Image (cartoon, grey):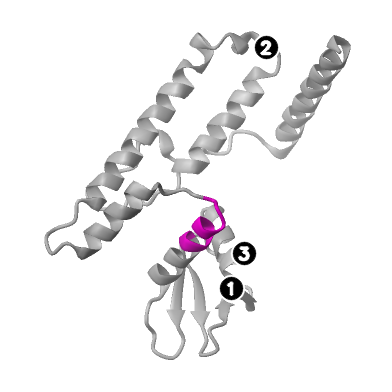
Amino acid sequence: MADTDKPLLIKRYASRRLYNTETSDYVTLEDISGFIRDGREVQILDLKSGDDLTRQYLLQIIADHESRGESVLPVDVLNDLVRSYMSPGASVVPQFLKASFDMLRDGQSRVLENMNTINPMSKMPGFDVMQAQQEAFMKAMTGNIPAAWPGMTKPEAETPPQPEKSDSKQDESLDAIKQQLAELQDKLSKLK
């Protein structure tokens, strides 16, 4: 099993092909994007020169997603990024990004805290399952932000969860979820 604490080492050959050193096979930018989405850090090195090409390839992944219409960065932010590279003084972009991610985390925690008290759907059967899925999604969206940026710390709530259940208990809770979903589907079909 691969050590996921270390970055996944990808080597770029002279042919510009990318080689995954853990699995001993060639990978694409889309594969690398998948590794990152799964929470894995990557490091891309040029085999001949030893140069670190990670930033270049990460920017290429973002550019590819943006060009396909999967816009994540608003035009104003892109303009600020270009300006920050062109200005001779210290860039405000790292502080801007830090403040943005802090606001995202604060908003996320407020939404999750108020979900049960404000939302009338909280009385609906199976809502606790949907809430757990929402929490997992929000943690996945913000839980892998590196704390290596200057002045940035991870919130306490984002420590990795400790295993609470054995596999048999997880199977039982999965069966319970399936049963709740079946009951919901039955109720919905009766409403029609």
96 vs 118, nearest the viewer: 96
Residue 1, numbered circle? 3
| Residue located at (64% from left, 25% from top) | 130
Q: What is the span of residues highlighted in magenta in the rendered image?
A: 62-70
Task: Please report contact status of discs 2 and 1: CB closer than 8 Å, yes or no.
Answer: no
Q: What element carries label 2?
A: loop
Q: What element carries label 3?
A: loop
Q: Residues within 10 Å of mark 2 (few under 14, many from 20)?
A: few
- Measured in 3D between alpha carbons, the distance from the residue under mark 2 to the one under mark 3, in whole angstroms, is 41 Å
Q: Quadrant of the N terminus?
A: bottom right
Residue receiving disc 1:
22
| Residue located at (48% from left, 23% from top) | 112
Residue receiving disc 2:
124
Q: Can residue 148 be seen in this view?
A: no
| Residue located at (38% from left, 49% from top) | 75
Q: Quadrant of residue 51?
A: bottom left
Q: In this view, does 50 lie to the left or right of 26?
A: left
Q: Which mark's residue is nearer the viewer, 1 or 3?
A: 1
Compared with 113, 142 (above or below) is below
Residue 164 picture location, percent across and down: 59, 33
Q: Name the residue type under label 2.
A: Met
Q: Name the residue type under label 1.
A: Glu
Q: Name the residue type under label 3.
A: Met
Question: Is residue 179 inside the magenta stretch?
Answer: no
| Residue located at (51% from left, 75% from top) | 10
164 vs 154, nearest the viewer: 154
- Measured in 3D between alpha carbons, the distance from the residue under mark 1 to the one under mark 3, in whole angstroms, is 9 Å
Residue 157 picture location, percent across and down: 41, 33
Compared with 76, 14 (above or below) is below
